[in-house]
Structures are given as structure tokens and as C-alpha cells.
Amino acid sequence: MLICANKSHLFPRVISIAISSQKGGVGKTTLSINLAHAFARAGLNTLLVDADPQGSVGLSLTRQSRLLSGFYDFLADPGIPMERLIVPTRLETFSLVAAGQASDYEAGNGSSGSHLARVRAFLRNASARRYDVCLIDTAAGLFGVTNDTIASADALIIPQQAEPLGIRSVPKLLEGLNRLRIINPHLNVLGVCLTMLQKNLAESTEADFSLRQLLPPEMLFTTSIPRDDIFIRASAKGLPVGVMDGGEGAEAVFDSLRAEIQGKLEKSQQRTAFNAH
């Protein structure tokens, strides 16, 4: 069902995927934007939500994002209609929701759990608009609104920079995953995606190899995201990398990652259906 992506509304309801990391600077927003674009190009109605108070997704794609109502405005006032939040793009199947003008206030108020009901209400509203995939770029750190978003999402992707520090943080990563599964027993941890991989740098490739030795195969995506100047140029122009001149190679990387995700989701649905019988 998930592989045949030549028409929209393939999922029985919106599949919400949180993209979260323990620390910033791991390429989370780059992954979110370009993965959403890959899903949309595959024919899936895709909503990209900027749940990072820094507003990195919005600032990367539209310079007017600070003037838009968005995700945190909904958390402050769930009566705001979704039509006021959703921003269409040039690609018919790709829309986004900015962080919003209330992001600075809402992000700093409330402990984990205080926004849970409103995050879930937001996702129900997205589902009612017949999106197939909702990707949520969260703030770094597994607390506050990020914690509530993961507790509400169907699935989770964890970007991890391919560097020696990534190896040292593995025990903390696994500990965090165990806590997340307690919060959301139905959470499908799709895996860790290595980012900023530099194949010409021994330390980076060694970190890649070591992480693949430390973590179970199902915990790491086969596809990794390279460090490439084209991502910076794309962000400067407010574009996904795939529409840039010379961006074909990077676009293919995200197509590969999308296919891996769809395969994992399909297997998960098959297991659920089997267990139900």
C-alpha cells in the first residue's frame, strides 16, 4: 500500500513522523525539508510542520515566516482554523506550517505533557484535511513541546551527525529511546539517520562504521546524508535541494531515504495486521 505512491491519500489516516535529536546542529531541518519534498514529489500529500521555536524550516523556505501564524499559535489558541496556518508551496502536494508568532512564549512555558492534548488536536486537524504524511521538525532535546510531539506521533526519525561525538552519545541515545517508548508505547522508532557524512574524512567514515557496529541494523537507516555545500546554497535561496542546479545527486539521497521509510512503515503495518488476527 505504501509503495505505490502514484496517487494521494494512500494512508488510512495521516502518518505523523517526528524528526528529533538530542542536540542541535545535526542537520535536522535540512533532513526535514528535503525529506518532505521527496514525499511530495512521490505523490503523497505532505505537510511539513515547524515545531522548532527557532523557526528554521520557515526561515529556510519563506522569508515571511515570522509574520505567519503557525504551530505555536495553535498551541496557544486551538480555535485557530487550519486554513490560517497552512502555507502552500509551488508543489501542489507540499504544504507547510510555520512555527508561528507565539513560538518564543509557548516554547518556554509548560513542562512535558502540558501541550499534549493540543498537539494531538493539531494532528487530528491535519488528518481531517486528508494529508498522507505529516513531518514535524522539532526542537532539539527530549522535553517540553518536543516530548509532547513525540508522545503524539506515529513514528520517529533521529538524525545523528557522523562524527566521533556521535559514538560517545550512543548510551544516552538508547536511554532516551527507552523513555520515549514508555511515553508512547505505539511509537514506531524508524531509526537513526546519519547526517553530514564526509567520505573524504577518516573521522567521519570511522564514526559511520562504529555506529553501525554498535547499533542493531534495524536501528540505522542504510541511507546517510552527506555534508554538501549545496544544502547551504539551497537554504539561502529558500528552496529544497532537489530544485537547485546540480541538486540531482542530493535529491536521489532523499528519494532513497523516503523509500526506506515507506518500507519500514509498510512492514510495521503488516505486523500490526498479523497480530490483530
Image: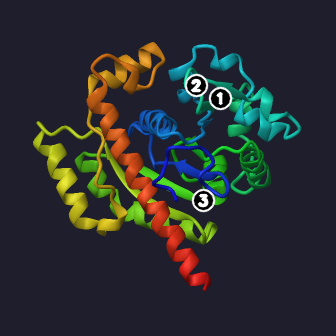
Mark 2, secondary structure of its residue: helix
Q: CA distance from mark 2 to mark 3?
A: 23 Å
The residue carrying mark 1 is 98
Residue name at image x 31 percent, y 37 percent: 252
Residue 43 image position (x, y, % from top left): 52, 39
Mark 1, secondary structure of its residue: loop
The residue carrying mark 2 is 58
**For this rendering, which residue is in front, 148 or 1?**
1
Mark 3, secondary structure of its residue: loop
Instruction: Using residue 101 as the reference point, say whether residue 40 is left or right of it.
Output: left
Residue 133 image position (x, y, % from top left): 59, 46
Residue 80 image position (x, y, % from top left): 85, 34
Instruction: Using residue 101 as the reference point, say whether residue 246 is left or right of it.
Output: left
Q: Is residue 96 visible?
A: yes
Residue name at image x 74 percent, y 29 percent: 85
The residue carrying mark 3 is 154
